[in-house]
Image (cartoon, grey):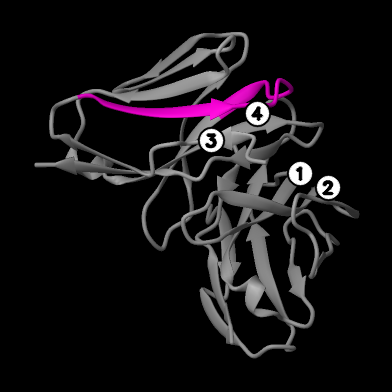
Amino acid sequence: NAGVTQTPKFRILKIGQSMTLQCTQDMNHNYMYWYRQDPGMGLKLIYYSVGAGITDKGEVPNGYNVSRSTTEDFPLRLELAAPSQTSVYFCASRISGGEETQYFGPGTRLLVL
Amino acid sequence: DQQVKQNSPSLSVQEGRISILNCDYTNSMFDYFLWYKKYPAEGPTFLISISSIKDKNEDGRFTVFLNKSAKHLSLHIVPSQPGDSAVYFCAASAGSARQLTFGSGTQLTVLP
C-alpha cells in the first residue's frame, strides 16, 4: 500500500491563480481530511469528507473547495490564490468504525506570490 | 482561541534521559487524544493515543498520561534517543467525523 499520496510536492502560484491539490489513498478509508499548517503553528482543518459525495467545512474553509466523487480521491481546489494561502497542506484519511488514527500524506508546500 | 495548547515550543534532553512533553486542552467534548511525530518535509506520523476513559497508555518507550480533571496530558519518552528528535504534536478528537484539533507542536532535540 502506498497509503496517502499527495501531488504536487511544491508549487509556486501567482496571486489570483487557481490550482488543485491532489490527494489519493489506497486503504479504502471512508474519512478524508484536508489540513493546513502555517509556520510555528499546529494543523488546522480546512474540509473533511465522511464518504463519497459527502463533504463538510472545517475550521478554515474560506478560499477553498473540495469534492469527493470516489472513495480514493479528495482534491482540494484553491480559487483566486492569495498570499494568506501560503502554507503546507496535508491530506489525511481514517477508516470508520472506532479506529481514531488519521494517516497523513507527505504534504504539499504552496507559495503564493 | 486555542483549544489545544503546547506551551513549550522546544525541549532539549540528553540521550538516555526522559523526555516529557506537555499538552493542555480546554474543550470538555474532546474524548480521544493522539500524539503525532513530524520530521521536516514529511507528514505527521502517529505515535500513541489515549481514550478519555483511561489515564495511561504505554507503547514501548512511549507513555501517555491523561489527567481529565486538569485537562492535561503528557508524553513520556524513556530512554530518549537521537532519532526521537522531531516536532511532536498533541491532537484531540471530537465530533461525529472525529475531527482533530492540533496543538502548535514542541520541537524535541535529543543530544548525543
The residue to which callout 3 is attached is: B5
Chain name for mark 4: A
Which residue position is annotated with label 2?
A: A51
Q: Which residue is mark 1?
A: A30
Label 2 neighbour load within 10 Å: few <14, some 14-19, many 20+ = some
Q: Secondary structure at mark 4?
A: loop
Quadrant assignment, res A75: bottom right
Q: Amino acid at mark 1?
A: Asn
Residue type for callout 3: Lys
Q: Position of residue A64 (x, y in %)?
A: 78, 68
Residue at image coords 74%, 23%: B29
- B64 on left or right of B107: right
Is the Cβ of the residue at disc 4 closer than 8 Å to that at disc 2? no
Contact check, label 2 and label 1, Cβ < 8 Å: yes
Give the residue at mark 4.
Answer: A99
Lower position in the chain sequence, tag 2 or tag 1:
1
Rendered location of residue B73, percent (x, y): 48, 21
Q: Position of residue A2 (x, y in %)?
A: 53, 56
In this rendering, the answer to whether B16 lies above or below A68 is above
Label 3 is found on which chain of the structure?
Answer: B
Residue appearing at x 69%, y 26% in the figure? B27
